Image: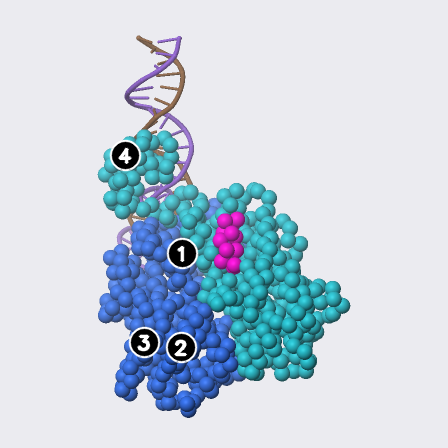
Chain colours: A cyan, B blue, C purple, D brown
Amino acid sequence: MNLKELAATLNLSQTTVSRALNGYPEVREETRVRVLAAAKAAHYAPNSRARRLATGRAMTIGHVIPLTGRAEMVNPIFADFLIGAGEVYAAEGYDLLLSMVTDGDTDKAFRQLAANGSVDGVMVQAPQDNDPRIALLKELDLPFLVHGRTGDAKGYSWLDIANIRAFRRATDFLLDLGHTRIALINGQANFDFAQRRLRGFTDALTARGLSPLPHLMAHDAMTESFGYLSAAEMLDGPDPPTAFLASSVIIAIGIRRAVADRGLRLGRDISVICHDDELSYLNNDVGGPAFTATRSSIRAAGRRCAELLIDLIRDPDQPPKQELWDVDLTVGQSTGPCPAR
Amino acid sequence: MNLKELAATLNLSQTTVSRALNGYPEVREETRVRVLAAAKAAHYAPNSRARRLATGRAMTIGHVIPLTGRAEMVNPIFADFLIGAGEVYAAEGYDLLLSMVTDGDTDKAFRQLAANGSVDGVMVQAPQDNDPRIALLKELDLPFLVHGRTGDAKGYSWLDIANIRAFRRATDFLLDLGHTRIALINGQANFDFAQRRLRGFTDALTARGLSPLPHLMAHDAMTESFGYLSAAEMLDGPDPPTAFLASSVIIAIGIRRAVADRGLRLGRDISVICHDDELSYLNNDVGGPAFTATRSSIRAAGRRCAELLIDLIRDPDQPPKQELWDVDLTVGQSTGPCPAR
DNA sequence: CCACGGACTCAAAGCGCTTTGGGTTGCTGT
DNA sequence: ACAGCAACCCAAAGCGCTTTGAGTCCGTGG
């Protein structure tokens, strides 16, 4: 059933039927009701391919996921973000086009999306320092929104959390408990968020006349095994830490395993603070928060990013939108005073 | 730059240019080379909206994710599957349309997708018993592939793992170690995979003259906290288990936390076997597998499902394809003989 | 020398919508 | 009674591709 047939059964022109369906004013209310009823009865739905061609809008937003063999490993985070964004897209009538590309083809993928007009805008996640995607998307003149930020953070729209402040606070919290040998188990070093978190960590230490210990810092994709291995190595090495700062709950889970393996007790022998993205299947709140954590819902971020992007698509000529979210520190059971030696 | 303009600059007709670009035989090699060069120079890419309208194919595959407030919680699993499938889609030139729908609107979403022709086929994940989606998709005549299966498993295409066999083997393994009070912490009861796993568990017990203990069974969304809470309750209750069987690594992580909280040692005081989907950020193999586990890569399943679905789309009239994957049991450090009392 | 088939190429007809640029009606005010 | 104006409705022109059906040209066999 297409528009032509529907119009024929109604003895109306395609124009009128189209207008009735799309809520244009120049059609009598009575006619509109009749059209809507007929459309419903016939299970008519406008062909989206034709509609897109005619309107020139794709009504689709692209997410490009590079398959680096490492970065997609943070997929629980990527997934929660995606779900948040997807909720909003659905509500606003946008489709979500997910494109997996092997690393290095990211450029090509964006160029392709822009050239063949299959999306109206794209979401950029996890920017690295001076991420080339930003310059490229500006050049392609494709609306985009960055979750995170990089470089001078000017001239484009983004939403980010206050990573420096969050990690500074978390570090201060540990310092106040008397810890001085604090380990930082962070995300991959080239990601902007990891750099900011490192900075917050360092700032806090420096302010107390301490400096970060190189053997107590690690950077890598935020998997459980990375957390486990780094913690194990640090705990077994010389000058072991009494506290850990982790960039993700997943890392913290690995740390917890290493701690338990050694017969140590979390919150008593070893303290851990992590950043908690509030992943739905890793709820940190059951029976009181397990981990002391800086927290910020990645899903809520996804929702807000989607809103901002859609707004940008609807009115591309507005100045860049930028939003910085503050982060809570929730005290859980994984931290305690530095044990006396 | 569109086809018309490109044709004009080449002094050729649109037909010829289109044919040259799409590899049809009726164009001279010399001409084809000339066209390809010009297209490249002009950064020409055919408008996908127009192409889709003209060909009648969407070159898009749909994944519909119901937002039940619970089911999407298994999103780490969903995400790995998605990435696997997405790799194949990309390689085969298909787009991936991700549609989040609030629960109860799943029907509407599928009908919509079918009616407006925005996808050529859909992937169905995590079927429940007699899942209504299957009947609906048959009715809509939309090619689909089910990851998992349900009902009589006839008349449609699916790929599944041998859940019954896997869980029977895992249970036998624990029984052989002398465990008799074995707890099962499973996924939501209405999912087919959970039912099969329960059956494998029960079968193994029954074969040895035992029967499952109601207070040692739990069903729910497979989150860390669910694992933690159920294990905690069972361990603190009367007749505590000496071993756990968990439907997911994520659950097992929760169990491990409960075990550690009580000062017990995994593999010595308490044994745990879980099903491991080989999630990339929860690698179970670092330093020898942490958990004894039945394992099967969900990402590989995603890849294979995508292949099957694309094949089905290309030739919709073939008989249903069905594939059953066997599952390995890897022995790790989380199991040991039942401690004497 | 002519008919014929293969090798190329083209104009034009869709694909199913939206949107432009008019027409008709039927009232109103003068 | 007539211009003027809403209020409706329509035919037709795109949107940018693919594909059909129809040439044109050239070399070959009869």
- Visible residue check, residue B120: yes
Q: Which mark is residue B214?
A: 3
Q: Which mark is residue A12?
A: 4
Tell me where the magenta segment starts and ends, as one range: A297-309
**Residue occupying the point 59% across, 58% down:** A327
Residue A39: x and y in percent read: 28, 42
Q: Does the magenta run of residues contain B17?
A: no
Residue extending farthest to the front is: B238
Label 1 and label 3 in one chain: yes
Q: Does the rendering let one see residue A201?
A: no
Image point (57%, 83%), residue name = A262
Marks 3 and 4 on same chain = no
Q: Nearer the viewer, residue A82 or B318?
A: A82
Disc 4 residue type (three-letter): Leu
Q: CA distance from mark 1 to mark 3?
A: 36 Å
* Residue contact between numbered discs 3 and 2, judged by CB atoms under 8 Å: no
Q: Looking at the magenta stretch, what is its main secondary structure?
A: helix
| Front tag of 3 and 2 | 2
Mark 4 or 2: in front is 2
- First in sequence, mark 3 or 2: give its number: 3
Q: Chain of mark 1?
A: B
Give residue A56's quadrant in the image: top left
Q: Residue at x 24, y 34 (%)?
A: A11
Chain on which label 2 sits? B
Q: Is there a contact, CB below 8 Å, between mark 1 and mark 4?
A: no
Establish if B185 lies above or below A141: below
Same chain check for tags 1 and 4: no
User: Which amino acid lies under the numbered mark 2 shown in the image of this protein?
Assistant: Gly
Q: Disc 1 versus disc 4: distance between alpha carbons?
A: 36 Å
Q: Is residue B288 above or below residue B253?
A: below
Point out which mark residue B237 bears.
Answer: 2
